[in-house]
Image: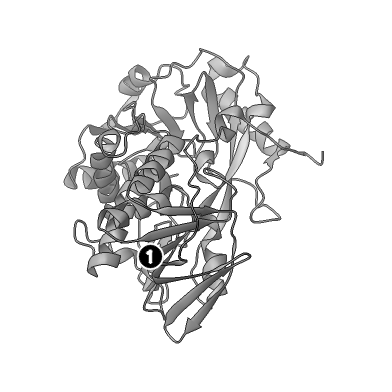
Amino acid sequence: MNGEFHSLSISLRVCVKIPSQKRPLASRTSDVLILGAGVTGASLAFRLAERGMSVTVIDAGEDVGAGSTPRATGGYRAQFSSEINIRLSLFSRHMLLRFAEETGVDPEYRQCGYLFLAETEEQLAGLTAAVELQKKCGVEGVQIVRMEEIAAINPHIALNGVVGGSFGSTDGFIRPLKILEGFIMASRRQGVRFIWGEKVTGFRTNGEWVKEVITGKHEYAAGSVVNCAGAWAGKVSGLAGADVPIRPLKRQVAATMPTDIIPPDLPLSIFLGNGFHFRERDGRVLLLLTVDPEAKDAFDTRVEHSWVQRVRTEADRWVPKLRDTQIDREACWAGLYEMTPDHHAIAGRVPGFENFYILGGSSGHGVMHSPALGLLMAELISEGKFRTLDVSALDPGRFAAGKEIGGVHLI
């Protein structure tokens, strides 16, 4: 086995049952062509179609949910240390609360909270500064918590080595597949065409204009083309000769055997030392670390035995009640973050092009920010500017211009 194993977790791989779209392709020309049918691309498709634009979405996967979206654990938080991420979270929360009304699908947003735990005074000072910024931006229910409060919020963790923390009561959990399903169903009602099983292999350009997108089966033309290919976005942009700094980063998730030791209403609890965090989902406890071994293949999604042993050790240290609970190796999985150098999303026109855009690189926050980013990108494409929230700092040209966004990157 070479210390590795594959997983087909039921909770991960369940297909979303969406009525198929079987109609002849009368035309392969549309106002907007979106490359990638994950949650970000689907969100954008819905908002563009709302504005009366004809939209086609192509994806290399064979069906809905074949990419990274279903591999997300499903967290939502406003506890960030950069203002732009905080405001994106607040905007997304506003839309999550209306999501079922808009799409007909319940995102199952549960406000169980996020609990960040500092192991040093320096970490606690960073949390304190972040909470002050969050409150300034309008985040409600966020506060610095001391030992007695931490013990009351989550009585299942060992506090030896913890000096304090922060808690956000409106943070919590969402269902990535539900959000993807909602956006796709709502998009189809607006006339969006989804095409599966077609991988982008090239672009036909004329100066600053993308004239056609080439797949292994067809060629597509559109007034605007948007790269929403997630962890593959850097590669896709490269096919057009554009250098967009989005790279994949493997994230592994260990799942325990079914247990009721950790109640489902406890917050996601994160230890800042090495990023160990855990939460309950569907009768199991999910265990994670923010630092994974470097994969030989950047797109490798195999779970590594050595990593499982490491996260098991951290769980035994911080959550004593889990010591007698076994890891279910058939329920573990791995997925890909789409990382940028400053751990913030990229949203805007690709440098050197007039009609080629990119939306991605959310660095682990793609599902939670997809409602906001899809709408904002639709504004940019249809109106020429971000109208509801100015996220021009996310422009893809910021890296070459030396304008990377600052902030402490917690998870």
Quarter of the N terminus within the rendering: top right
Residue 365 visible in the current orientation = no
- The kind of residue tagged 1 is Val
Residue 223 percent coordinates (x, y): 37, 72
Quarter of the C terminus within the rendering: top left
> In this image, 407 relative to 195: left or right?
left
> In this image, 146 relative to 410: left or right?
left
Query: Few, some or many C-alpha atoms within 10 Å of disc 1 (few <14, some 14-19, many ≥20)?
Result: many
List the residue tagged with mark 1. Answer: 32
Please identify the quarter of the rendering in which residue 314 is found.
top right
Look at the picture and state if 101 lies above or below 184: above
Q: Residue at x 49, y 29 (%)?
A: 278
Residue 229 percent coordinates (x, y): 50, 58
Look at the picture and state if 142 lies above or below 370: above
Secondary element at tag 1: strand
> In this image, 396 relative to 170: left or right?
right
Residue 373 percent coordinates (x, y): 33, 54
